Image: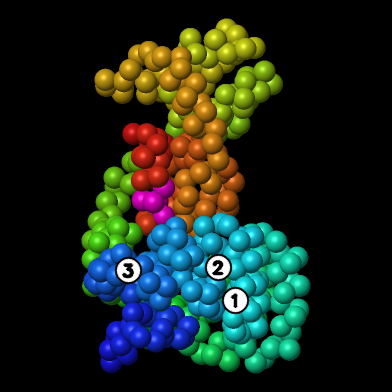
Amino acid sequence: MESTQYTTVDLFADELPSMDEIDTLSKYVRSSESNQIDFAEQIEQNISRTGQQACLATGIGLYLLARYDEAVNKLRKAAQCKHKFIYLARCLRRLGRFDEALESLDKSLTHGAETLGVALEKTATCRDAGNFQEAEKLLKTCANFEKVSAEYHFQLGRLQEVQGMYEQAVENYKAAIELTPSHRQALFNLAYRCSLGGDEQAAIDYYRQIVSRAPVYTNALLNLAVLYEDTGEYEKAGQCVDKVLKFHPNHQRARLFKKDIESSKTMYYDEEKEKRKDQRTQILETPISDFELSVRSRNCFRKMGIRTLGDLLRISESELLSYKNFGETSLREIKVILEAKGLRLGSALEEQEGAETSADEAAIDETKVLLGKPVEDLNLSVRARKCLQKLNIQTLAELVRKTDAELLGCKNFGVTSLNEIRQALENLGLSLRTLE
């Protein structure tokens, strides 16, 4: 029923739709791949038109398709009106051109734009620019809309959230929902904050409120699926992902997630095999600090990043002896420890068939630079980043020394996050540590 309502919004009608109607159209366009394709075709049919009204409609359409550079070029050719300057400002904000966006919003006021709406748009622009002080000043000018405007409370909550004032942000999201129960952004941010705060049931309830309404909200469905998977409700998680794939059949994250859920439902646990693995793992992951070593040896291992017995199997005698301050005495000390466990230096290197025995110095330097990069460079999801923070993993070198089991041992870190990290590392030619 609602989809019919959305499709009646025609950007290229004689009279341009209202801002509310365009926002409704935006939700419809983004709700499925087929809608995006159909809408993109409509825009392409009109993109060559040069009239000011056509440029305005096409520019807005390009904005809805997230083609911001093209949208800016079209909107600049449109006649001056509030629609032009507001959508131009939105494009410029997403392109990071914040000062130009603010100028455009100021111009919209001279063409009849609503004062409150412009102030809140400027607030969002200043927030994205990192100018929190100016954003606070703008919100103070709107203080008389407290408990009146849902959007005012949402923007106040967003500003508080990026400043780390999470409890206040949650209260403002709730205030926004009380005023407008269908405010999807407020519901989404509230659900997300509840999830990060450990209140998973509340997060599920809020996400369910979002997905119960049309059109499809993909991110809400996927986040809800993550929560269901974490609580072992694989059927419900699968239903959420299936709904995403129904409307977005080529959604890569959803397709990967579906495979993870199916794997989780059919996973077979071999207790004896796991016991054998655990015994070997316990030996190889025994910290070097558990043994009585000389101060010199301990310091050398710390600087070399050698933390466990397993790490010693991946380094040869010559490599150890080449390290500054590490001599024959320290080497004998380590050999005694390993022999007692039936291990020896460099054995893991010998087991790697086809491993290269030499490498170009430039390649080695490049690898060192790569491993020294922060994990933020991987552009991981918020859940994965939070788990890495809990584990105090700051660089790629620290990450690749972790095993699957170590990461999965972190609360709220599931198979999806693990696969996400594996893929990100694989793209760089790296991988997590394995012990077998």
Tell me the element at label 1. helix
- In the rendered image, which residue does mark 3 sit on? 49
Q: Nearer the viewer, residue 212 or 3?
A: 3
Q: Residues within 10 Å of mark 3 (few under 14, many from 20)?
A: few
Residue 433 in percent (x, y) is at: 41, 36
Q: Real-space Cα distance between discs 2 and 3?
A: 22 Å
Which of pointers 1 and 3 indicates the residue nearer the eye? 3
State which region is magenta.
Answer: 417-421
Tell me the element at label 3. loop
Query: Given the image, on which type of amino acid does mark 2 rest?
Result: Ala
Residue 213 in percent (x, y) is at: 38, 86
Q: Earlier in the sequence, mark 1 or mark 3?
A: 3
Whether residue 427 is visible to the viewer of this picture, yes or no, is yes
Is residue 361 magenta-colored? no
Residue sitting at x 62%, y 12%: 324
Residue sitting at x 59%, y 81%: 111
Whether residue 315 is visible to the viewer of this picture, yes or no, is no
Whether pointer 1 and pointer 2 mark residues with C-beta atoms closer than 8 Å, the reply is yes
Query: Taking 115 as reference, is 267 left or right?
Result: left
- In the rendered image, which residue does mark 1 sit on? 108
Residue sitting at x 47%, y 62%: 72
Tell me the element at label 2. helix
Whether pointer 1 and pointer 3 mark residues with C-beta atoms closer than 8 Å, the reply is no
Query: Taking 76 as reference, is 44 left or right?
Result: left
Q: Is residue 161 above or below residue 120?
A: above
- In the rendered image, which residue does mark 2 sit on? 89
For residue 355, which quarter of the picture? top left
Q: Earlier in the sequence, mark 2 or mark 3?
A: 3
